[in-house]
Image (spheres, rainbow, N blue to C red):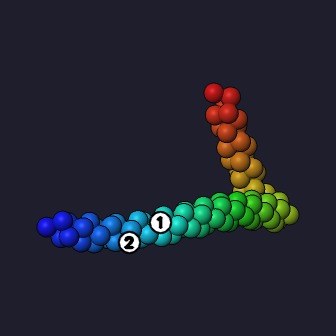
Amino acid sequence: MTNRYEELISKFEIKLRKLIAEYQSLQVQSDSLKAELAHKNESLIEAHGTILELRKQNDHLLMANQISGNKEERAEAKKQIDRMVREIDQCLALLNE
C-alpha cells in the first residue's frame, strides 16, 4: 500500500513539475507579448503624431494656396483662419479650466 502511495506521489510530483514548467514558459511568453504590445503602442503614438503633423502641413499649404488665389479664395482662407483661431481659443479655454 505504501508503495502505491509513493507511486501516486511520484506521478503527482512529475505532473506538478511539468505544470510549473509550462506556467513559467507561459509567463515568459506573456512578458514578451506585453513588451511587444508596448512597443507597438509607442509606434502607433509616433505614427499618430506624424499624421497630425502632416495634416497641419497640408492645412498650411492649402491656406497658402488659397491666400495667393483670387478674392473668393482669400475669403475662404480667411474663414479657415478664423476657424483655426476659434479652435485654438477653445483649446486655451480648456487648458485654463
Q: Residues within 10 Å of mark 1 (few under 14, many from 20)?
A: few
- The image quadrant that residue 19 belongs to is bottom left
Q: Residue sitting at 39 percent across and 68 percent down?
A: 17
Check disc 2 and give the amino acid type: Lys
Q: Which residue is labeled 1 in the image?
A: 24
- Given the current orientation, which residue lies at the most extreme top position? 97
Tell me if residue 83 can be seen: yes
Do the residues under discs 1 and 2 have CB atoms within 8 angstroms? no
Q: Residue sitting at 68 percent across and 47 percent down?
A: 83
- Residue 44 lies, in percent from the top left, at 63, 64
- Residue 26 lies, in percent from the top left, at 45, 68
Q: Residue sitting at 20 percent across and 70 percent down?
A: 3
- Dot 1 lies on which element? helix
Q: Residues within 10 Å of mark 2 (few under 14, many from 20)?
A: few
**Which-is-in-front pick, marks 1 and 2?**
2
Q: Is residue 67 left or right of residue 22?
A: right
Q: Residue sitting at 18 percent across and 70 percent down?
A: 4
Q: Earlier in the sequence, mark 1 or mark 2?
A: 2
Find residue 73 and name its label.
Answer: none
Check disc 1 and give the amino acid type: Gln
For marks 1 and 2, give the CA distance: 10 Å
Q: Which residue is labeled 2 in the image?
A: 18
